[in-house]
Image: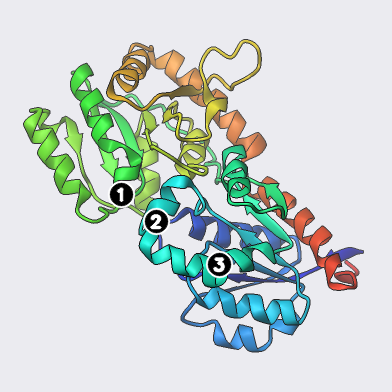
Amino acid sequence: MFDYMKVLHVVPFLPKASGVTTFVVECSNALRGMGHEQTIVTKEDHADALARIDEFDIVHLHGIWPPFYHRFVIAARKRKIPIVWSIHGMLSPWAMKYKRWKKIPAWWLWQKRDLKSAAVLHVTSEREIEWVRAQGFTNRIVNIPLGTKLPDAVPARAHKPKRLLFVGRVSPIKALDNLIRAWDLVRPADWALRIVGNDERGYQASLVRLVEELQLGASVEFPGPKFGTDLEEEYRNADALVLPSHTENFGAVVADALAWGLPVITGKGTPWREVVVGSGSGSGSGSGWWVENDPENLAKALRELMALSDEDRRAMGERGRELAGEKYSWAAIAEQVKSVYSQTSRLRGGVSRTCGR
């Protein structure tokens, strides 16, 4: 016997380069594999699901701000269907300041009240809990990270030049200007920096100009966004990953890099303290660096990474791969989400459906 749940996932859209998309799709797939019915709707195709919302045990909302969420909140509240709401970093101080003029009316007209009505608020790091509590929310909060897929094997990586990989939005929030300035301080002769991702609001043009001003030549590359097998090829051919962001609620690309056996350098604006090198006390995995994201500190971490032998770098990558397998597989993440759903579904005044297997 097992608790069988029908869950409705609501998300505005599902862009390829999105941690939200990855969580919704991969977690839903893992839950389906456990025998639970998962329905995903977007802004374009949500009308039918809204009309038959009474069929679902849980309504799971992903992200905040679009007004169409409000319709689901009203419908779920009317039928006493519990809401699980994944914030996905959208209450960070940085995010709240961005287009603040547009968010303030929505915040006071419906968004804050709707969030308060959620049975559970889902975050992906301890830092995000602080952001949510700072906005005055007293709801139950669950901290469940994003997951990753573990490749069956990782390559030996004997190519030259070696590659330092960035994956993500090419956006000011990622502090890529600081990374390029750090690259200028180090000027490694046998490494290339690949900045892979979608340009946001023309930011890449300013980075290209900076590369030209610093005369870094072809050592900094902008291959554009990559998806699917093309993105896997980037991880396969990389030797390390860097994520210097000013702020991240999670930073899914770090989990992906660990799964691919890559050492990582992350800024302290990310929650990835556990990768730190030199963790004799057990406080970190010894699979990377967690540093201030100014050019000088990033440069120091780059020098330490590039001074490693191939054998030492592979050992760091293996420690990261072990960490990813233990904590960040989609099966492990889905088990945690399933537990939250099971507990929350009982708030409807009954229990979730029970089926025999």
Q: CA distance from mark 2 to mark 3?
A: 25 Å
Which of pointers 2 and 3 lies earlier in the amino acid sequence? 2
Mark nearest the camera among 2 and 3 is 3
Which of pointers 3 and 1 lies earlier in the amino acid sequence? 3
Q: Secondary structure at mark 3?
A: helix
Q: Which residue is at 61% across, 30% downward?
A: 323
Is residue 341 or residue 107 the one in the foreground? Answer: 107
- The residue to which callout 1 is attached is 197
Which numbered disc covers residue 125? none
> Percent from the top left, x then y, of residue 356?
91, 69
The answer to whether residue 146 is seen in the rendering is no
Q: Secondary structure at mark 1?
A: loop
Q: Are marks 1 and 2 in contact (CB under 8 Å)?
A: yes
> Percent from the top left, x then y, of residue 206?
15, 44
Is the residue 69 above or below the residue 206 in the image?
Answer: below
Which numbered disc covers residue 17? 2
Circle 3 Cα neighbour tier, 10 Å, few/some/many (<14 / 14–19 / ≥20): some
Mark nearest the camera among 3 and 1 is 3
Q: Which residue is at 22% across, 46% downward?
A: 223
Is the residue 225 above or below the residue 240 in the image?
Answer: below
